[in-house]
Image: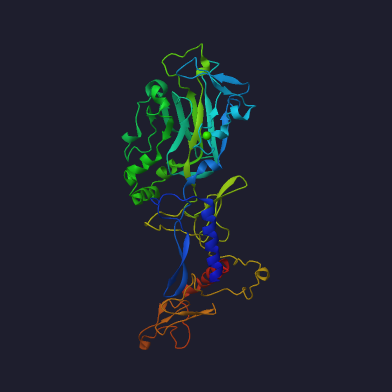
Amino acid sequence: MRWLALLTLQAAWAGLCQAMQHYPSVWGHYDVCKSQVYTDEGLTWDYMACQPEATDMTKYLRVTLDPPNITCGDPPETYCALENPYMCNNECDASTEELAHPPELMFDFEGRNPTTFWQSSSWKKYPKPLQVNITLSWNKTIELTDDIVITFESGRPEQMVLEKSLDYGRSWQPYQFYATDCLDAFIMEPKTVHELTQQTLLDIICTEDYSRGYVWKYDKTVRFEIKDRFALFAGPRLHNMASLYGQLDTTKNLRDFFTITDLRIRLLRPATGATMVDEYNLSRYFYAISDIKVQGRCKCNLHANSCVFDKEKLACECEHNTTGPDCSRCKKNYQGRAWSVGSYLPIPKGTANICIPNYLGPVIRPNVSSLGVANRNQARVCDNLMMRCQNGGVCHNNQRCHCTPGFTGLLCEKPRCESEAGGCPGAKSGQAALLPPGRVAQLPLLMTIAASLLLRAL
Ligand SMILES: [Ca+2]
């Protein structure tokens, strides 16, 4: 039994290592869902809150553009530089691989020179707005752990909104507004993330930090600052993650704020680099994005430390007797109490809040013959995992606890009466005490729990 359990642990670890990359140790804890520990009473399971490691989530997304035919190159087009209308050497042709700029080039490995990028068609239909929605869908709830960074190959847009969905794209909420002039574009006072406080952390702001015209050549990124928001609780270098985890644990709004199923980048107005649009050189105006970074982890409600991508879909590998893509319900026959999310508290291991076997109902038995395990039909009273004999008692053949002289009861949980003269009921020598009436009702439960746990362990 022990080696089987160890094998399971080993497999879990291997899966974790394969599925997820290492992330800086600042996150530290919650990487193990359960561990075997030796106590005075033998080998037992210790359960703890766990979550997958953060990783590059762009490997698992689906991208859609609206309008769908907005990508350049069909028909082929030649673009001019924003800062010089006579420098027109940017060619886009969807039918030639070297000159095509399809959406997937926003997510390929960057670091090569020249960069690879997606590009829109130009603002030919000016003054009709040139607007593009780029939707990133995971078909799975994920939790953001680092800044979203969008790197533009063109000038950064003069107006843009980043939006999020928590319901697979049915409804959308803004994350942040971006504009060269927030008042003019969105009737919002310009702000920066550094003006936010713990109390206003969830406020949606408009920032002018990433849209200013002429510096675009040197700074091409547009950010949604996750870490600066974390830092409001965890300190400037995120050294106090315990404080952040404590807040996430107790404030659902805060946790939901960083949780998404989809992101939508709404490009509303391209860079023009000047106050007036040059109507005679509209091929200077377009969007081009070379890279999008989204770091995060699968949301598994602290019931899984690994998340697998199978058949184009992410799913948590649930532990703690939970199931579902997000481990958001108890497994069949493990509904002995209401499902509950795990807790980050107490630091560092948290609380697993595992699902427990049903109070009543049939004991689950795997196909006994196929397992080659005999004599599994009898419910167990005690074992070395969960139903441990207490107060120094020893489990005998999983059928009864041999208690030390001072104790009695099914699991030796009950002290024997000190004084025989007191007429203690049921404390006859050489015989396990009868359970008092209240305990009798629990006996089937104890046996069911013991049997289920043991069978599951096997
Ligand atoms: Ca690229």
Quadrant location of the C terminus? Answer: bottom right
Asked if 430 appears above or below 210 in the picture, the reply is below
Q: Quadrant of residue 348?
A: bottom left
- Position of residue 78 in the picture relative to residue 27 (left or right): right
Question: Residue 4 at what x, y percent from top left?
Answer: 56, 68
Question: Residue 396 at what x, y percent from top left?
Answer: 52, 80
Question: Residue 226 at what x, y percent from top left?
Answer: 40, 40
Quadrant location of the N terminus? Answer: bottom right
Is 116 or 353 nearer to us in this picture?
116
Is 268 or 354 nearer to us in this picture?
268
- Look at 42% across and 79% down and name the residue there: 392
Residue 17 visible in the picture: yes
Count the labels in the image.
Answer: 0
Q: Residue furthest top?
A: 280
Indicate how the structure is coloured in the image. Answer: rainbow
Is 394 or 50 nearer to us in this picture?
50
Asked if 414 appears above or below 259 in the picture, the reply is below
- Look at 39% across and 22% down and name the residue there: 214
Residue 357 visible in the picture: no
Asked if 64 appears above or below 393 in the picture, the reply is above
Is 132 or 210 nearer to us in this picture?
210
Question: Residue 237 at what x, y percent from top left?
Answer: 33, 45
Q: Residue furthest front?
A: 113
